[in-house]
Every structure is written in structure tokens, then in C-alpha cells.
Amino acid sequence: MKFQLLVIADSLHYDYGLHSRQSYIDQFVRRLERCGQEVVVTYHAPLALGTVAEVLQQVPLGRYDLIILQVANRHLRHPRLPLRPTPTERLSEYVRLGALSITSFVGRVPALQEVQHHLAAIFRVLWRHRRKVILLTPFPHLEPVSGWLRKKGSALLREAGKRNGFRVFDTQWLVEPREEYFIPDDRERLNAVSHELIGRRLFDFYREEPTISTGRLTLDT
């Protein structure tokens, strides 16, 4: 019997800079195949965070054996991102980071509020299928503001996901925001080493982490 895998993600799951079959999804599928599975992968990517719940409503979720969901990478990043920042630009980035940190103490950060809102909609759609869903946290980022947003977003997803009975795989714990994990001269896209590491550990997580369940859906994410 074929193993049906659904992947909901943005473009970072397969992004440029990698050779064929080097993405973390490819690495994960290859390990399933080594265990004798005939894997059929259905992709819905790249997707903006605000469209994920709507797309999921159109997908026959019951036919899939596993659903891998990684969203909000593009949402949790600074909109202006020079690849090779000048010293002045780097200083400005840290100034913006300081201002953002202060904002988070005295109020709510709009990008994180939007993630909370969209996660609630996604959880409504996936609730009945939560035992076969793995949520991945956003990838780390080398740019200070984007990195901060990704960490906060990852913490938000971990808490909300586990509270609502979803398994959560934490990429922030696995891959550190250091240059050796990224494609050269790119502060956002992970290199083949990082993808291999994520794919391998995701497979271990899938096989070893028990499914969890809660009694009711909690939407105050």
C-alpha cells in the first residue's frame, strides 16, 4: 500500500541553492523508502500563511497517512533584507531589533498576532486529523529582526500546537543561526547540511514521538 504524504509549506522547503533531492522533505522521504514504503508526495507550496486554512479546506485530508505543515517563514521576516548589509545597515538592523523588543514588552507585535490568528483557522481545519499532523517551527534566520520574529513565532507555535494536540518538531532547537548552516552570502536559506540534518531528525521524530491528543480544541492561540 502506498504511503500518502501531504506537505504544506512555503518556498523554503525546497529553495534554490540545493541540488536535486537535497531538501529536508526529500531526505525524509528517502528514509521512508529505505523502510520499504512506496511514498506518494502531494505538495501545496509555496503558500502564504493567510491562504493555508482555505487551501486545507479543499484538500481531502482523510486520504493522507501523514501531513507535514511548515508555515510562517515568509511571514516572520523583515520585509527589507539586504543580502550583504553594509556596517550602517547592520547597525540599523540592531536598532530595529531593540525597538521591536521594547514593543513586545509594552504591547503586541502585529506579525505575531497575525500568526496567532491564522494558526487558529488552520487548527480548526486540521483538528480531526491532528494525530497524523507534524507541525514544523519556522527556520532560523541570520538577520536580527527576522531571527527574533522566527524565535518568537516558533515559541508561539510550540505552545499552541501542543496545547491543541499536535506534534511539533522544533527546527530552532536543531539548527542554530550560524553562517555554517546557511547558503553562502544568504542569511535566510539553509544549506544542504541543514536540510539533511532536519530531514534525518524529522524522520526519527516521526517514528519515535508518540501522537498526542487533547480533549478539546483551544483556539486562544
Image (cartoon, helix red, strand yellow):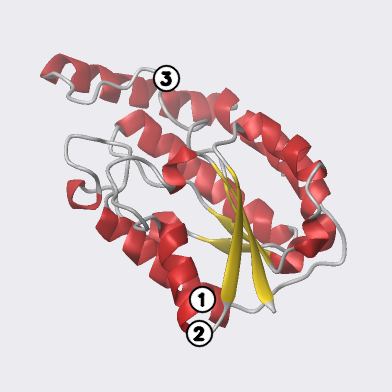
Residue 204 seen: no
* Lateral position of residue 199 relative to residue 135, left or right: left
Label 1 crowd bin: few (<14), some (14–19), many (20+), radius 10 Å: some
The image shows residue 140 at horizontal and vertical percentages of 37, 46
Task: Name the N-terminal-most of marks 3 and 1.
Answer: 1
SS under mark 3? loop
For image coordinates 72% across by 72% down, the residue present is 212
For image coordinates 42% across by 47% down, the residue present is 14
Give the spatial CA distance, label 3 vs label 1.
37 Å
Q: Nearer the viewer, mark 3 or mark 1?
A: 1
Task: Name the N-terminal-most of marks 2 and 3.
Answer: 2
SS under mark 1? helix
Q: Amino acid at mark 3?
A: Pro
Query: Label 3 near label 2: C-beta < 8 Å?
Result: no
Q: Amino acid at mark 1?
A: Leu
Residue in the foreground of this view, choosing between 132 and 81: 132
Residue in the foreground of this view, choosing between 129 and 59: 59
SS under mark 2? loop
Q: Nearer the viewer, mark 2 or mark 3?
A: 2
* Lateral position of residue 54 relative to residue 153, left or right: right
Residue in the foreground of this view, choosing between 159 and 126: 126
The image shows residue 192 at horizontal and vertical percentages of 27, 55
Query: Label 1 near label 2: C-beta < 8 Å?
Result: yes
Label of residue 35 in the image: 2
Q: What quarter of the picture does the N terminus occupy?
A: bottom right
For image coordinates 48% across by 46% down, the residue present is 138
Q: Amino acid at mark 2?
A: Cys
- Give the residue number, with chain letter if any, for mark 1: 32
Above or below, 118 relative to 207: above
Residue 110 seen: yes
The image shows residue 196 at horizontal and vertical percentages of 33, 63
For image coordinates 45% across by 81% down, the residue present is 34
